[in-house]
């Protein structure tokens, strides 16, 4: 039987699904061409419906830190399905998951499981508002905290990729309660606080940003936000949906030694299945229903299959902390190869990297906030993206996304990546040379 190709599937998909995809950034709108329809994945590789194999540097936007279909995670899922799929009642596994998260992330004294990072972030700001009795929140331009209305203001990730950082459908009333500042700009935050004294419930930040591409906090920035939150009674929320359990067993807050009041989590804690979570100080979390009055609920929250996949993943990371050094080395190996290729082509583009996250920005400026990131040449990025795809490497189809390196890459994969980057960036350099002669 001849199976439909990605092209045929996409032509059909657009008849039934908006834009043919169930999440916008997958549509290749920013890079052009037909999105790949993925058939399977294993370790460091994904396989599309046309029988092509790619080395994978998206890893489902973060969850597949161990690589795809890790045997331990697979076994945990297979075992869990034997006991049926969903009960809508408390289970032993949810207690084990909560205990493990609290152990790995000490600032989290209590935690509530939900089904996505969006849910976790929506719940966290509702909780901050309920706890403080205040209305406004501060977020940062280019940061993305899911598609909750309050966050689709100057949002990064797919919203930035699609050129709609401020989405239609978000009411002015909602937008009025979301204040924004440039990432890494403490003065701008202080000005917002002074202009809205005693009415700011929370500051929510990606401690390392993934959603404008990978952007690191400047020294003192995260600590400065901590001090401002202490001084003004503001709830400090680390959105660690991406960085949690990726940058260290305890996430970015372990790496930077900062204690937020609340942390939102997702991706890795589901091991590839739909899981989110929010947690933090007992005093704040005990305001969540039914312990307190801040309402939040979910039919599939704590789903036993998803929790089993997440538990297997987290337990492996907890029991093998050496993996984080390996991930850092793997990622530096890739970025060093890119630096070599850029130098060989006399290109001076910017690379940001931390742990197993990195981005190559097609700009010569340092990238420390969203304005810097937007100086990138997205046309050159699109050319690079497709040149890498041709060479069997699957990158995020947007300049405004971080890449995620898994532990599954082999020596052969590193050599392949180095060669592909050298060739793809030579094509980019050639294009620049042609353009400059016009
Ligand atoms: P989800 O609702 O997509 O599980 O999580 C939302 C979210 C919250 N916070 C951060 C820091 C995030 O990165 C995300 C989601 N990340 C994007 C990738 N940039 C998900 C990919 C997509 O939207 O398809």
Image: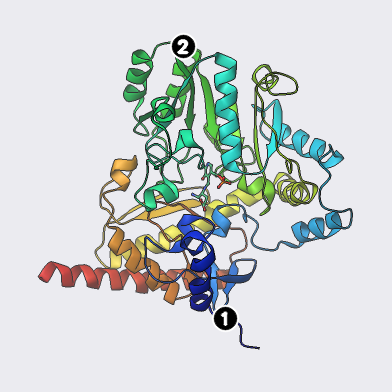
Left or right position of 93 against 369:
right
Q: Residue at x 79, y 39 (%)?
A: 94
Q: Residue at x 30, y 72 (%)?
A: 426
Within-10-Å neighbours for mark 2: few <14, some 14–19, many 20+ = few
Q: Residue at x 43, y 76 (%)?
A: 390
105 and 290: which one is in front? 290
**Compared with residue 283, is residue 123 higher up or lower down, i.e. above or below?**
below
Residue 259 shows up from this direction: no
Within-10-Å neighbours for mark 1: few <14, some 14–19, many 20+ = few
Residue 176 horizontal/vertical position (percent) = 39, 26
> Pointer 1: what residue?
4
Measured Cα–Cα span from mark 2 to mark 1: 60 Å
Residue 75 horizontal/vertical position (percent) = 81, 60
Q: Which disc is residue 231 wearing?
A: 2
Residue 267 horizontal/vertical position (percent) = 61, 48
Residue 229 shows up from this direction: yes
| Res 183 quadrant in image | top left
Residue 1 horizontal/vertical position (percent) = 66, 88
Which is more N-terminal, label 1 or label 2? 1
Q: How is the image coloured?
A: rainbow
């Amino acid at each position: 039987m001849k199976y439909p190709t990605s092209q045929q599937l996409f032509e059909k998909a657009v008849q039934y699904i908006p834009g043919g995809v169930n999440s916008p950034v997958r549509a290749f709108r920013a890079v052009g061409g037909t999105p790949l329809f993925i058939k399977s994945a294993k370790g460091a590789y994904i396989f599309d419906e046309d029988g092509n194999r790619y080395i994978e540097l998206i890893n489902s936007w973060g969850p597949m830190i161990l690589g795809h279909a890790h045997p331990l995670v697979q076994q945990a899922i297979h075992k869990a399905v034997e006991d049926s799929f969903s009960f809508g009642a408390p289970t032993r596994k949810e207690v084990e998951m909560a205990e493990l998260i609290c152990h790995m992330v000490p600032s989290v004294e209590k935690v509530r499981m939900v089904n996505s990072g969006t849910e976790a972030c929506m719940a966290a700001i509702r909780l901050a508002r309920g706890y403080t009795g205040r209305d406004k929140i501060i977020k940062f331009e280019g940061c993305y905290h899911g598609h909750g209305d309050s966050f689709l203001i100057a949002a990064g990730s797919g919203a930035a990729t699609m050129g709609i950082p401020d989405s239609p459908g978000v009411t002015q009333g909602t937008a009025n309660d979301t204040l924004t500042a440039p990432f890494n700009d403490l003065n701008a935050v202080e000005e917002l606080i002074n202009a809205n004294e005693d009415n700011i419930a929370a500051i929510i930040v990606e401690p390392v940003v993934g959603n404008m591409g990978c952007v690191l906090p400047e020294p003192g920035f995260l600590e400065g936000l901590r001090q401002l939150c202490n001084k003004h009674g503001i709830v400090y929320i680390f959105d660690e949906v991406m960085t949690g359990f990726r940058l260290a067993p305890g996430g970015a807050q372990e790496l930077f030694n900062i204690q937020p009041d609340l942390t939102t989590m997702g991706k890795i804690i589901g091991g590839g299945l739909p899981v989110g979570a929010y947690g933090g100080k007992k005093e704040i979390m005990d305001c969540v229903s039914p312990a307190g009055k801040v309402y939040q609920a979910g039919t599939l929250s704590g789903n036993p299959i998803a929790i089993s996949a997440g538990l297997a993943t987290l337990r492996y990371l907890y029991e093998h902390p050496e993996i984080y050094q390996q991930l850092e080395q793997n990622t530096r190996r890739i970025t060093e190869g890119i630096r070599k290729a850029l130098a060989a082509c006399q290109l001076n583009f910017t690379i940001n990297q931390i742990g197993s996250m990195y981005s190559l920005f097609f700009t010569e400026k340092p990238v420390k906030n969203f304005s810097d990131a937007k100086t990138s040449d997205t046309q050159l990025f699109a050319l690079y993206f497709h040149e890498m795809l041709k060479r069997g490497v699957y990158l995020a189809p947007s300049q405004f996304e971080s890449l995620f390196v898994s532990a599954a890459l082999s020596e052969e994969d590193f050599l392949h990546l180095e060669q592909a980057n050298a060739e793809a960036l030579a094509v980019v350099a050639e294009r620049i040379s042609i353009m400059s002669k016009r």
